[in-house]
Image: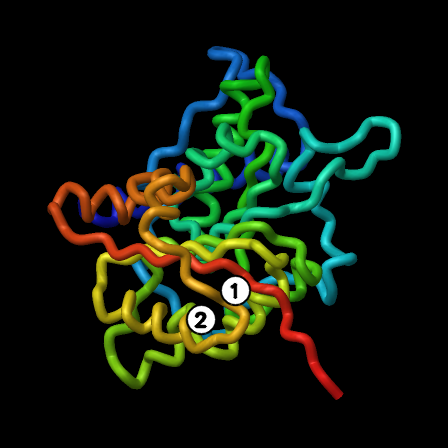
Amino acid sequence: MGSNCNATQRKQYRDERDSKRSALKHVQFPENEKTGQFDLPKKKFYRQRAHSNPFSDHKLEYPSCPNDMDWKKLYPGFIDPETNELTSKVTIADIGCGFGGLLIDLSPEFPQNLILGMEIRVQVTNYVEDRIIALRSQNKDTKAYQNISVLRGNAMKFLPNFFEKSQLEKIFFCFPDPHFKQRKHKARIVTNTLLSEYAYVLKEGGIVYTITDVLDLHEWMVKHLEEHPLFERLDKEWESQDKCVQIMTNATEEGQKVERKKGAKYIACYRRVSNPVIIV
């Protein structure tokens, strides 16, 4: 009986949030009659499996090419009133953004950069979207958090559909699914083929950030990045001075769980090098 009641309560809560999200996510937010702002969403109402099969047909929507993507819907605060066009393009991507902790912490550090989170799980994406809506509403006087957004997408399949060649400056892979079984290693977010796609959308000098608490996965990602000709590893001194490394170490929910359990965190950062000169 209690289980059915909780399920009904979650559905009612999500239906209410869905209604608000549909009405508000593409426009400036009106004041709430009681508080003048929207409350932050409650994570308990957005239950979802911890992992999702990236090879499944998730009925995702995606543009046929980057020019077909209407980014104005995601970043209304960056629309030029005279031209009705965005003043900037997305330059930072958090792949598998989870509950949005990294997005929230990166936002004030890069106020002029458009930052996008990509997440494949439906309810997790909805939670992050509702979280951003609430933060924008609560900070409408300063227009904070207008530079972050989230969309449901599968980066393993459709990343070049969203981003142009050399568009991104930073790509984050924070605590990705380790896919422990060997037969599922092909589903890991870092592979030789996928690294070529990341190199395509990343500009020369751009950075790939990786962090995990699974040593085997860390070694896997390092191995594949080391083998790829378009990436070179940045040393520990660089990592210690980079503010993004400092932020991603504890910003995500997974990172905070690892911290509470006093677990290890393995970090590796790679710079996108220049394309090699082809001598004919």
Please give left or right for residue 14 compared with residue 36 in the image.
left
Please give left or right for residue 112 compared with residue 104 in the image.
right
- Residue 142 in sight here: yes
Image quarter for residue 2?
top left
Residue 45 pos. (x, y %): 34, 41
Separation (CA) of disc 2 from disc 1: 7 Å
Query: Circle 2 sits in a helix, a strand or a loop, which is it?
Result: loop
Residue furthest bottom in the image: 280
- The amino acid type found where label 2 is placed reads Pro
- The amino acid type found where label 1 is placed reads Asn
Residue 215 pos. (x, y %): 21, 65
- Residue 9 in sight here: no
Query: Circle 1 sits in a helix, a strand or a loop, which is it?
Result: loop
Please give left or right for residue 155 compared with residue 263 in the image.
right
Residue 280 pos. (x, y %): 75, 88
Query: Which residue is at a point 55% across and 24% down the rendered structure image?
Result: 144
Query: Which residue is at a point 46% across and 40% down the rendered structure image?
Result: 103
Residue furthest right in the image: 82
Residue furthest left in the image: 262
Of mark 2 and mark 1, the one earlier in the sequence is: 2
Please give left or right for residue 248 compared with residue 60 in the image.
left
The crowd level at tag 2 (other Cα within 10 Å; few <14, some 14-19, many 20+) is some
Looking at the picture, tell me which residue is in the foreground, 191 or 121: 191
Query: Which residue is at a point 71% across and 40% down the rendered structure image?
Result: 88
Q: Which mark is residue 154?
A: 1
Query: Which residue is at a point 40% across and 33% down the rendered structure image?
Result: 41
CB under 8 Å between discs 2 and 1: yes
The crowd level at tag 1 (other Cα within 10 Å; few <14, some 14-19, many 20+) is many
Looking at the picture, tell me which residue is in the foreground, 174 or 43: 174
Above or below 83: residue 195: below
Image quarter for residue 224?
bottom left
User: Mark 2 highlights which residue?
Assistant: 54
